[in-house]
Structure formats: structure tokens, C-alpha cells
Image: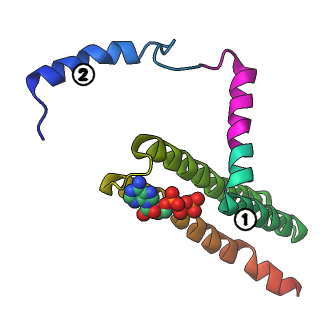
Amino acid sequence: MPLSQKSLEQASDATPKLAQPNRDMAWQVASNLLASFRFAWNGVAYAFQTQRNFRIHVVVGAFALSLGLWLHLDATSIAILGLTSGAVLTMELINTAIESVVDLTVQQAYHELAKIAKDCAAAAVLISALASVLVAGCLLVPPLFARL
Ligand SMILES: Nc1ncnc2c1ncn2[C@@H]1O[C@H](COP(=O)(O)OP(=O)(O)OP(=O)(O)O)[C@@H](O)[C@H]1O
């Protein structure tokens, strides 16, 4: 549905308010850098405790990095393995965040847009995981076969 002139004006009035650094709408804002890290760590701990796929990706990523070190891969290859593993974990965290926001919004009701949001978030994890398999295949498999 096209936006009316009035709603466009309301949206443009709201922009400076939303851009204020003190974020009046927020229930709580991190008071300092240490608090920001603590909240971020809470997110990692929550994902690890509740998301089986996140735990699997942590184990697989740690295994890939350990294998790379054991095979004496060069620094660039280790960095690529680290970036790839980090990307998968990041996607998993974003997926978890999107699922929570969708559930908060629609609760237990079915909504086609909720389905699209969750399916696309899950697809982001899948694509990053497939890319990591490709990276592992290129960087780890040849030196592993050479060593065995
Ligand atoms: N409110 C909803 N409305 C429509 N479809 C939904 C809704 N909630 C979930 N779904 C559908 O069910 C699927 C599974 O939802 P769920 O919340 O369990 O996510 P998930 O991707 O399986 O979770 P995880 O990543 O933890 O394995 C979604 O991908 C979506 O297709």
C-alpha cells in the first residue's frame, strides 16, 4: 500500500528522534564498554546453551582450525578458515536473533511474513555452512591427503 503524504511527514519527523544517541525507547542501554561486552557474551552463551546447530558449528570450526594448525597451513589459510568459521557462527547468532524477534512479534500465530523471515534467516546459515565446506575442501583436504 503506498504511503500517504501524512505518514511520510510523520516518518520524517520521527527520524531525528530515533537518531538520538540516548535511545529513549529502549528498556535498557549498555552504560559502558564493559557492559556492552557482557551483553554480547550473554548472547553467545544463550546461543551455545539453546541452539544445537550453534554448538555443532563451534565444534566443527574448532576442529577445522586445529586441523589447519596441525597441517602447518600458512597464515593466510588459517585466517580464511577463521573468517569462514566466524561467519557461520555469526549467521547462526543472527538467525537466533531474528527467530526471537519474529516470535516476540507474532507469538504463536502463523504469518506468511514470519515464515519468510525465519526461512531466509535459516537459509543464510545454510549458505554460509556450504561455503565453509567449500573452503575446507580447498584448504584442508589436499594437505591432509598429502600427509596421510
Ligand atoms: N509464526 C510463524 N509463522 C509462519 N511460519 C513459521 C512461524 N514460526 C515458524 N515457522 C516456520 O517453521 C520453521 C521453523 O521455525 P523455528 O522457529 O523452529 O526455526 P528453525 O529454523 O527451525 O530454528 P533453528 O534455527 O533453531 O533450527 C520456520 O523456518 C518457518 O518456515
Q: Is residue 19 above or below residue 71?
A: above
Q: Residue 8 occupies which quadrant of the picture? A: top left
Residue under pointer 1: 56
Coordinates of residue 81 in the picture (x, y in percent): 71, 61
Q: Amino acid at mark 1?
A: Ile
Q: Nearer the viewer, residue 79 or 2?
A: 2
Q: Is residue 104 above or below residue 64?
A: above
Residue under pointer 2: 11
Q: Residue 134 occupies which quadrant of the picture? A: bottom right
Coordinates of residue 142 in the picture (x, y in percent): 75, 81
Quarter of the picture containing the C terminus is bottom right
Left or right: where 116 falls relative to 21: left
The segment highlighted magenta reads: 29-44
Coordinates of residue 31 in the picture (x, y in percent): 67, 15
Q: Residue at x 72, y 37 (%)?
A: 42
Quarter of the picture containing the N terminus is top left
Q: Nearer the viewer, residue 20 or 50?
A: 50
Q: Residue at x 47, y 13 (%)?
A: 24
Crowding near pointer 1: few (<14 within 10 Å), some, many (20+)?
few
Coordinates of residue 71 in the picture (x, y in percent): 87, 71
| Colour pattern | rainbow
Left or right: where 4 falls relative to 46: left
Q: Amino acid at mark 2?
A: Ala
Left or right: where 55 falls relative to 18: right
